[in-house]
Amino acid sequence: MAASLISDKKSIIGNLPLCSDVLNQIEMIKKIGAQIRWLDERKIEIDPKNISPQNIPCDLFEKMRVSVLLMGPLISRFKKIKLPHPGGDKIGLRPIYSHLEALKDLGVRIEESPGFYKFTAPQKIKGKKVVLKEFSVTATENLMMVAASAEGKTIIEIAASEPQVQDLGNFLKSMGLKIKGLGTHTLEIEGRKKMRQAEVDISPDLLEAGTLFIATAVSQGNVLIKNINPDHLTMFWEKMKEIGVNFRLSKNSVFVKKSRGLKAARIQVLPYPGFPTDLQPMTSVLLSQADGKSLIHDPLYEARFGYAQELKKMGANIEIVDPHRAFIWGPAKLKGEKITGPDIRAGAALLIAGLCAQGQTEISDTSQLDRGYERIDEKLRKLGAEIKRITQR
């Protein structure tokens, strides 16, 4: 959706998840001036011809981390913009240092004032080789969107290669750009002035698939999860086999069966195609039901273990060694408690813990869950979970 703003041509995006972050992003680009037309339940047409970055709603922008992705396309198209600081989950500092340094490499001048960034790009941004400071998904995506209208070739090294980066690349190719290296850590992008009308279907959400997979495993269910791309979770499947989850993969689905005798494991979070940081909290719940001592090491975010204290209240045996490592002993008998999910993935982990805990679990601030999961309570209820929403969306 952000990339659609690079051009003044219409774009069509299909297979949209109707979670609140997506719906808020739609509202934000509407307020900027884009015309949105719903073609069916999950497909929209975006006409960005008359957008103006001066109309950005600060309240929405500061609410969501995904708003950081407006930086690239608006710089690419308007050259001089002023943006509020982006919001996001409370899982660490998550500075946008990598974004800013990469933009500076392309000649963008950046000034920071209280609550805002001012960006001034050359009228003709020239492509060059840029080495990112880390494997950052959003920094890679922002740089790709600026490179889309740059003169000549931009080479991005230490690029993230996640499926959402590949989706963006395919969307830009649909606009007429030449891009090499999608799915690798080196991208080559040939910029162009004129873009074509573009259309793309978004890949299935690997994180929702992984969340439902673990929810099934801890609750001893038998569930077929359809419309997935198994290739997006290669390392995740390997670790699930090691833990002892009983499952069978097909071309675009996974069948999770009742799993007995779960075993402890060592989980090392790594950039894609390694083990995803966003499935680490849910995996911790699974390991709390496994036999033995497990280790989770997540070097990406210093506050990712914010959910652990809530799990401990429920009876999980977890020791936080440092901001990036935790030991988990299992199996533990979890009991229902009143708990709070501090971020999207923590909320999903605690929801899963509630499914396998004895008694009633009450989770507050479910708005975090709604940001990343579309009606997850309804989906789980259809699978037999006793779950009730007691506040409005």
Image: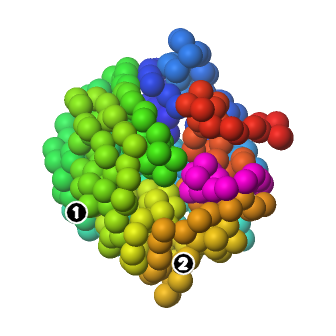
Query: In this orientation, does residue 288 appear?
Result: yes
Q: Residue at x 26, y 55 (%)?
A: 241
User: Is residue 358 magenta-colored?
Assistant: yes
Which circle marks residue 318 in the picture? 2
Q: Residue at x 54, y 12 (%)?
A: 40
Nearer-the-camera pick, 51 or 14: 14
Residue 23, percent from left and from top: 63, 34
Q: Residue at x 21, y 48 (%)?
A: 183
Near mark 2 (Cα within 10 A), the count class, few <14, some 14-19 or many ≥20, is many
Residue 32, percent from left and from top: 65, 36
Do the numbered discs 2 and 1 sit on residues whose CB atoms are within 8 Å?
Answer: no
Query: In this orientation, does residue 85 appear?
Result: no
Query: The disc labelled 2 sits on which kind of residue?
Result: Ile
Distance (Cα) linking label 2 and label 1:
38 Å
Nearer-the-camera pick, 223 or 167: 223
Query: The disc labelled 1 sits on which kind of residue?
Result: Glu
Residue 85 horizontal side relative to residue 195, left or right: right
Instruction: Check the picture and name the quadrant holding the C terminus.
Output: top right
**Residue designated by label 1:** 157
Question: Tag 2, which secondary structure?
Answer: strand
Which stretch did the figure color magenta? Answer: 348-364
